[in-house]
Image (spheres, rainbow, N blue to C red):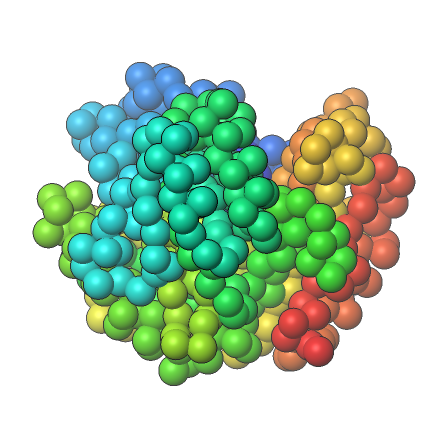
Amino acid sequence: MNLLLIGSGGREHALAMHLARSPTVERLYAAPGNSGTAAVAENVALDAADHAAVIAFCARARIGLVVVGPETPLVAGLVDALAAAGVPAFGPTAAAARLEGSKAFAKEFCAEFGIPTAAFSVFDDEAAALAHLAAGIGPIVVKADGLAAGKGVVVARTREEAADAVRAMFAGTFGAAGARVVLEETLMGEEASFFALCDGERAAALGGAQDHKRVGEGDTGPNTGGMGAYSPAPALTPTLQERVMREIVHPTVAGMKARGAPFRGVLFVGLMLTAEGPEVIEFNVRFGDPETQALMPRLAEDLLPWLIACAEGRLPEGAPRMKSSAALTVVVAARGYPEAPKKGGAIRGLESAASIEGVEIVHAGAKVENGAILADGGRVLCVTGTGATLREARDRAYAGVAAIDYPDGFHRRDIGWRALK
Ligand code: AMP
Ligand code: GLY
């Protein structure tokens, strides 16, 4: 089967590395891909927003399955357009992608189906939101309703900070995403990411991971797309994972089906592990980045048949087998990330880093120019170490990072601290 993978980040390179090894795959294309996917797939210059162009390419290249990496094309209905053209795809329709595309939708959905999440209110105008804040007590989280690349959330410590965030959102800081604002109670606990494959009716647990959202060591500084991850997440015990499947994933799949928008694809549940149990912080309708970089090396079997089964609505019993080993991913970002990453910095030493036992390098915002690898985004590289234990995985990942010569880059030195403390 020929496969088309949509996206250009570290997640897509990690998926491409795994899928390229599948015996089912004849040709693997990545659109647009990056300098990393170019080594395992054929990059094609396609704009995922141009549905007609993607469909035409699928016909020309006899694509048997499209795997959509990022949320933007899902929310924009790429899978709907492909379905209308008879092209199978792994990923939800636009209606099902609203679980990520609209935080108000996700919260109201949770409330309707009894899925545990923080208490919330939704506001379409600034005055009402500010009045709610003035009447409330305690810290509050302010969220822009729409997609904001992980940046539309303010965990306010004071009422003034919350009010400033509300004003900024209604003033258009996040564009149309902030025309509606969700105010919610602050949940306490450890955060974790959980992934389940869904076929519209059934769900199979893929596994858990923990991300590091803040840019600085000790979880300080602004939020980012994620500075590192590891899998498994010791905090997300097998018992808790079963609870997440029972209390969150299965009710979500059943609820979306009941709403006439069956969810097919990977459901990524952003969790807070509170004293009362796991609660939903957010839903994402795609694989996590960088969680995928830590999940893929742990697969003990080919993921592709599972992706096909999801797309076809015939997920079998059971779940993909995972190795008992651990994986830890360190993100190397361009100096200035997340505000103003420096582009163009030269990167050397990737081959020697990748030759270290148990080290895998994934390219994110990187490009090749005249044979040189240059930074071309905020998160530039991801270095994953695998090992029998998380400690070994971490030591390998950092040995890999140390072998890379990228003077304009930086990374967090404390990835995994929660699990290894
Ligand atoms: P989100 O984009 O919804 O994942 O939010 C970004 C980050 O804000 C999350 O990873 C959490 O660290 C934090 N956050 C969001 N909602 C809450 C909440 N209700 N309580 C505490 N922290 C939250
Ligand atoms: N790492 C978090 C995300 O993919 O949204």
* Residue drawn at x 32%, y 31% as measured from the top left: 124
From the top left corner, tell me how far across and down residue 396 is, in percent. Answer: 75, 67
Does 336 sit left or right of 280 as displayed?
Answer: right
- Viewer-closest of 360 and 406: 406
From the top left corner, tell me how far across and down residue 126 is, in percent. Answer: 40, 30
- Please, which residue is most extreme toward the bottom here? 239
From the top left corner, tell me how far across and down residue 42 is, in percent. Answer: 52, 32
Q: Is 181 placed above or below 239 here?
A: above
Does 398 sit left or right of 59 as displayed?
Answer: right
From the top left corner, tell me how far across and down residue 45 is, in percent. Answer: 51, 21
* Residue drawn at x 85%, y 41% as measured from the top left: 406
- Viewer-closest of 338 and 27: 338
* Residue drawn at x 63%, y 75% as measured from the top left: 419
Q: Is 246 placed above or below 56 here?
A: below
Q: Quadrant of residue 229?
A: bottom right
Quarter occupied by the N terminus = top left
* Residue drawn at x 87%, y 45% as measured from the top left: 405
